[in-house]
Image (cartoon, rainbow, N blue to C red):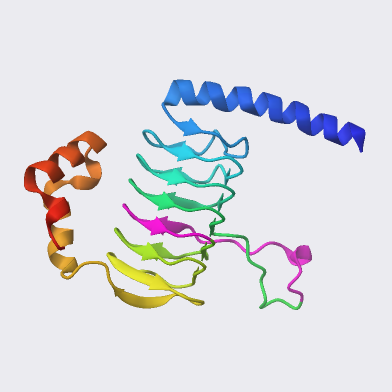
Amino acid sequence: MLRRILKNKIYSFFQIIRVSLFNIINGTEIFSIYASTHALYGKKVRIEEGAVVTPDVTIGNYSYINFNSRIENCIIGNYCSISDNVSICPAEHNIKKILSHPLLGDKKRKKVYIGNDVLISHNVTILEGVTVGDGAIVGAGAVVTKDVKSYTIVGGVPARFIKNRFKSNYDVAKYIKENKIYSMTPSEILNLIKREKLDNKVL
């Protein structure tokens, strides 16, 4: 027991050093020792303590993962906000075999795709093979089993459409695409909002 505790302490110490060096070199803000440095991280990606990020994950610029989330086998776009205790692409049991137990082999998972500016709220689970479109919002506690359209709000178990995010999703999507907003830096976005007074408009 003592040997195991000591081993974990040594592992944690070296992980802290490894992650700290990774942050300096790559300009990331990773605070979790469970976030793989073999995953692909964009500019200013932030990973909070206790979050697990596996090596088969790609996270876009300025996105963040909050405390104690588990992110696996997925591609996440720019400016995404992923809350605490979120699970993306967890391993699933194959119930079509005679035993659902992993004794007969793990089920191969399909990758999850998360667009840009997606808000995933507290305690959400997103199952394998799902695509969540740009600008979508997933309500707290939802279990997402099917694709989510861009700029829609979904919630529930299983997650269902609640409403569109904007009065005209088409117009907002067109404006974002024309101005390449998801490719901008934070300062460029803030300047655009200030210049065109977007924060005072009802979208």
Q: Position of residue 177 (x, y in %)?
A: 16, 53
State the residue at coordinates (53%, 53%).
84
Q: Residue furthest right?
A: 1
In the displayed structure, would residue 154 be above or below residue 35? below
Q: Is residue 185 visible?
A: no
Bounds of the magenta segment: 99-122
Main secondary-structure element of the magenta-colored stretch: loop
Q: Is residue 142 left or right of residue 185?
A: right
The answer, for residue 41, to whether it is visible in the render is yes
Percent x, y for residue 29? 46, 32
In this image, 63 relative to 165: left or right? right
Name the residue at 39% across, 63% down.
Answer: 131
Spot occupied by residue 35 in the image (x, y as percentages of width and height): 57, 39
Quadrant where the N terminus lies?
top right
Q: Is residue 106 left or right of residue 184?
A: right
**Going by the image, does 118 lie left or right of 25?**
left
Q: Is residue 93 inside the magenta stretch?
A: no
Q: Residue furthest front?
A: 200
Identify the image quadrant of the C terminus.
Answer: bottom left
| Quarter of the figure with residue 5 | top right
Any magenta on residue 117? Answer: yes
Residue drawn at x 39%, y 70% as measured from the top left: 147
- Expressed as whole percent of the image width and height from the top left, the position of residue 3 reads 90, 32
